[in-house]
Image: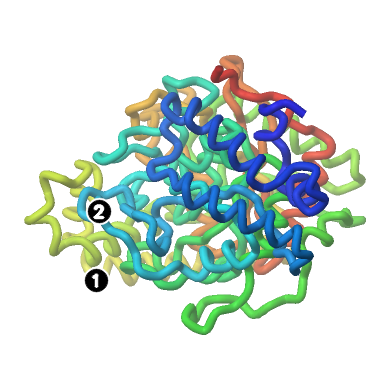
Amino acid sequence: MNKEEICYMSACDMVDVIKRQELTSLEITETIIERIEKINPIINAYCTPTFDLAREMAKKADEAVKKGDKLGALHGIPTSIKDLIQTKGIRTTFGSKIYENYVPEEDEVVVKRLKDAGSVILGKTNTPEFGHVTITDNLIFGASKNPWNLERTTGGSSGGAGAAVASGISPLALGSDGGGSIRVPSCLCGIFGLKPSYGRIPKYPRMGVAFYTWDHYGPMVRYVNDAALLLDAVKGPHDADKFSLPEQNINYLEGIKEKPNKLKIGYSLDLGFAKAIDPEVEKNVLNAIQKFEKLGWTIEKAKIKLRRAELVFYTLVTAGVAFDHKSELGKWKENLTPGFAKQIDIGMQTSGDAIEKAINQRRLMYEEMYRFFQNYDLLITPTTAVPAFELGSVGPQKINGKAVSHSGWYAFTHPFNATGLPAASIPCGWSSEGLPIGMQIIGRRFDDLTVLQVSKAFEEIAPWQDNKPQLS
């Protein structure tokens, strides 16, 4: 097995070869570190590597195998963590000059669970300031670049993670998603990303309220099995997070071995409000949807209308951003990303009445999805309305000749943060420029398993992993 094959090996396969010591965790880790040192200067995926720690953790993992100790689900697997997630003893900047030298004294619950499962921590991946935008760029580390075209965006805010996984320098990546931040970079970088049900993975300790009821932690990977593997390791309730969900006693890795016999799947190319979609995205998603008919599932175009979805997202998130950061605006304004400073200004002007109207509209959006799932088992949409666009832009102003809002290109993702439903992005095709296109699979409340099962079924019908970006 050559070095590239090791770097692109699935995490599930890594677990097996480490347990049998056909390859040691240290051998795998050193191979990936060597590739990071070569590739990361090109794509800027990692902002804070932790190679010494990774080597130490890998050695301990191999010693545990030799001793015959009980091994965790992720034993010896090199893993990256987004820089919005706090890590004990490892710098966590949140992509902001304000926290440029901040080193947490405590791991978040999800990080502790990764460690308890045996993960080897490779480092932190790049993110925009406080995850405020769906591209990945900040004033400390600069922009992450799309490995399929270095002049294009990775998306965000888990853009460093998306680039790392696609480039074979992170077998497992932990991302977060407050409006599309796992699914968007997974789509634009050509990998699989899962936003589990809200509360499936607990969040504690955390800072601020801006995304308090919006953001989900989840896996970003190249194989659907690996997403299930990671989710099994970190899911489950925690008393410090009042929104964390009770254990369902579901083993996702085992569960995705089965395919549902009957499914009724609805699809939408606009959710009743999205203004435009790139023709290549539309064509590839429609072609992908038809593949499900091979499994005997019913597919039909669905009537769904999510009213004022963009207003709900923008109003509540900007108000939260203002609450969290208004005191820093005066002292730190020159060191804030301009778009982030603008968000604070706008949020400070948001009235209480506007916030309550948005909260009420969010309720109505959830009720619309409740009614949808009375008739369907799943909803399919594009993940983004366009493939990856130019680096330095925050998004296209026009799509297919039609003017769109600032969030028009990711209109399909944020509604499912507002509703808390499980949603995944899976590669489903390629643009004429060789850029990945993603399809979004949304499940009913708490039904992460069906989302994963259908994702696995599509992966088997239309695998994408043999296509790799050429970076060396």
When the figure is inspected, residue 372 is found, relative to residue 222, above or below; the finding is below
Question: Residue under circle 1?
Answer: 352
Residue located at (76% from left, 75% from top): 249
**Viewer-proximal residue among 307 and 49:** 49
When the figure is inspected, residue 91 is found, relative to residue 201, above or below; the finding is above
Q: Mark 1, residues whose alpha carbon is within 10 Å: few (<14), some, or many (≥20)?
A: few
Disc 1 is placed on an element classified as: helix
**Viewer-proximal residue among 207 and 103:** 103
Residue located at (61% from left, 33% from top): 168
* Residue 239 image offset from top left, x and y in percent: 52, 84
Q: How many marks?
A: 2
* Residue 366 image offset from top left, x and y in percent: 55, 66
Question: Residue under circle 2?
Answer: 101
**Viewer-proximal residue among 454 and 176:** 176
Q: Are marks 1 and 2 in contact (CB under 8 Å)?
A: no
**Viewer-proximal residue among 134 and 410:** 134
Q: Earlier in the sequence, mark 1 or mark 2?
A: 2
In this rendering, would 216 be left or right of 219? Answer: left
